Image (cartoon, rainbow, N blue to C red):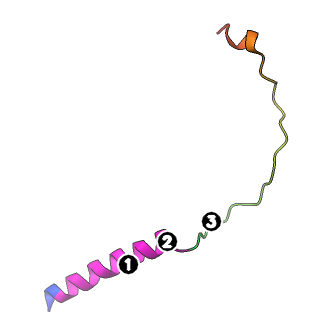
Amino acid sequence: MGISNIIARITEYISEAAMRIFGPTDDQYPNTGVQPFTGEPYKKGTADIW
């Protein structure tokens, strides 16, 4: 009885992990879209002076 209980727990653990990996995402990230660029444009001459 103990071995069958251990095998059942291992099977449940692996199947829950597989359902979490291959299931639909449940992330609650906001929809951001395209963000405008607010930095300085790259200038080749000034970036090489470091």
Q: Extreme bottom residue here?
A: 1
20 magenta-colored: yes
Pair 3/1: label in front = 1
Q: Amino acid at mark 2?
A: Phe
Q: Amino acid at mark 3?
A: Asp
Question: Is disc 3 surrounded by few (<14), some (14 to 19) or many (20+) residues within 10 Å?
Answer: few
In space, the residues marked 3 and 1 are separated at their CA atoms by: 21 Å
Q: Amino acid at mark 1?
A: Ser
Above or below, 10 relative to 29: below
In this picture, residue 8 sits left or right of residue 30: left
Q: In this picture, which residue range is highlighted in magenta?
A: 4-23
Where in the figure is residue 47, as x and y percent of width and height?
Answer: 70, 14
Q: Which mark is residue 5?
A: none
Question: Is disc 1 surrounded by few (<14), some (14 to 19) or many (20+) residues within 10 Å?
Answer: few
Above or below, 47 relative to 31: above
In space, the residues marked 3 and 2 are separated at their CA atoms by: 14 Å
In space, the residues marked 2 and 1 are separated at their CA atoms by: 10 Å
In this picture, residue 11 sits left or right of residue 40: left
Residue under label 2, please give it: 22
27 magenta-colored: no
In this picture, residue 49 sits left or right of residue 37: left
Residue under label 1, please give it: 15
* Secondary structure category for the residue under label 1: helix
